[in-house]
Image (cartoon, rainbow, N blue to C red):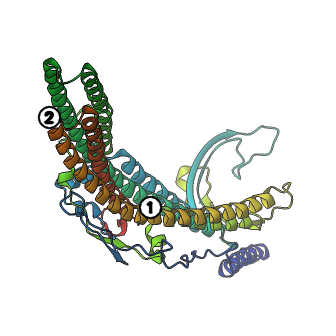
Amino acid sequence: MIPTRKSRLCRLLTTSALLLTLLLLTSACVVGPRFKKPAAPDVGGYTPVPIKNTTGTPNVAGGEAQHLEEGGDIPGDWWTLFHSRALNDLIERALKANPDLKAAQAALLVARENVLAQRGAYYPSVSGSFSATRAKTSNELSPVPNASVFQYSLFTPEVSVSFVPDVFGLNRRTVESLKAQQEQARFALAATDITLSSNVAATAIQEASLRAQIDATNELIKINTNMLEILRSQYAKGYASELDVAAQESQLAQVAATLPPLLNQLAQQRDLLTVLAGGFPDKDLPEKFELSNLQLPQELPVSLPAKLVEQRPDVRQAEENLHSASALIGVARANRLPNFNLTGDIGGMALAFANIFSAGNGFRDVTAGVTQPIFDGGTLMHRERAARAAYIQANEQYRSTVLTAFQNVADTLNALQQDADGLKAAAASKDAAAVTLDLAKKQFQAGYVNYLGLLSAEQAYQQAVINLAQAQGNRYADTAALFQALGGGWWNRTDVP
């Protein structure tokens, strides 16, 4: 059949629209700034004066000297360096059952699916439809179908294809922003994982320290009770005054009063450990922690400052937040530019269902269009300005996060040295107080020292024992804090994305 002039014109217009679309696709650009990863801070260390190896205190639990290995890698299971089977079991159980960790895993899945959903805009959208109509036209009007009937049925199957070329990168910038948000969720999961393991370790160490303080307090109660019995015996024989007995009763009451708060703290730590492990506090944990069952890690890896920004999940989250803000500038800019679209329909139309696909009953159309915002009251302009301001905000938040990360490491390194010195002093103080108390007890029984001297020795010994237990706990706790401050070694774990 020889094509008519009208059909040739339609084909020409269709071909022109397709060529125009192809031209737009091949010359497409992506508006908005290209994100550049922030450079690592140009600093050589964490503290003004390099931290040296910590001092050691022999014959004291947690008194080992610690060697700082500059540039060392953080093990993914750093808590195993404490050589506590109970701690290992509890952390592994928490990593499997903690609801916060499971929520972070679900958040990562949500972010991933949002990226995949947005990527669908890269492809044409195809939909199919079918309609069946029974109609009757007015006798006053000409019959609608060629069959010249006033009552008829109309069957119309149709396939529609629509496509929006990403000419200025609106969809690409949107996908870029969502991918950055997916990375944020990934690093949030890593941060939750590190925080969980660190909290379990810190709580277990605090429990061990409290148990040592409770044991010391019980021992002091026992000592003061024995002294009270001795004084009462001496008072009955006339060798001690009623004032001495009353003073010792007061001393015993004061020591006994310090025990309930310690027991309360211990119960709270046990409840916290149970919840961190994903359980309810009505059931006690099988693990119990003592300072004597923990070993202080003696080799401590300290990451280089340039690596810290790569290892800290909170820094990486802030970086991806900056990346997302950068992409949203492109989204806001692209929304102010022309938007192109291409649609096409193909189908059939017949009065009888059997004739739907008969020759001559088909139809098709192709449409190309462009939309350019002309006036919107400044809405799109101000949205772009807001996106640029949000990028500045995200950039400052990133810088603040980096500064905080370096501060955390510096604080922990300083604490390690101070903890070592503090433990050494506390051990020496406790030994001296024990000798003083022993001599005071002997001299008091022999009548060479009055009761006030003995009471002073008891008080000094009490405080020295408590201080030693706290100093031991501080060394363990700040060692765990160093691993957390350096990123927790999540990159060496297989169970963290």
Give the x, y percent position of residue 12.
Answer: 74, 78
59 or 157: nearer the eye? 59
447 or 77: nearer the eye? 447
263 or 395: nearer the eye? 263
Q: Is residue 354 above or below residue 33?
A: above
Q: Are marks 2 and 1 in contact (CB under 8 Å)?
A: no
Give the x, y percent position of residue 41.
Answer: 55, 76
Asked whether residue 124 is in view, the answer is: no
Asked whether residue 291 is in view, the answer is: yes
Residue extending farthest front: 448
- Label located before the other in sequence (2 or 1): 1
Q: Residue at x 71, y 74 (%)?
A: 14
Give the x, y percent position of residue 360.
Answer: 63, 64
Number of other residues with Cα within 10 Å of mark 1, as a class: few under 14, some 14 to 19, many 20 or more: many
Determine whether the residue tagged by mark 2 lies in a helix, strand or loop: helix
Residue to which mark 2 is pinned:
445
Q: Nearer the viewer, mark 2 or mark 1?
A: 2
Q: Residue at x 58, y 65 (%)?
A: 398
Give the x, y percent position of residue 305.
Answer: 47, 75
Query: Left or right: where does residue 78 sit relative to residue 446?
Result: right
User: Disc 2 residue type?
Assistant: Gln
Query: Left or right: where does residue 34 sit relative to residue 202?
Result: right
Q: Is residue 80 above or below residue 445?
A: below
Residue to which mark 1 is pinned:
186
Number of other residues with Cα within 10 Å of mark 2, as a class: few under 14, some 14 to 19, many 20 or more: some
User: Disc 1 residue type?
Assistant: Arg
Query: Left or right: where does residue 112 sit relative to residue 212?
Result: right
Q: Residue at x 26, y 46 (%)?
A: 465
Q: Residue 368 sits in which quadrant?
A: bottom right
* Residue 51: numbered disc: none
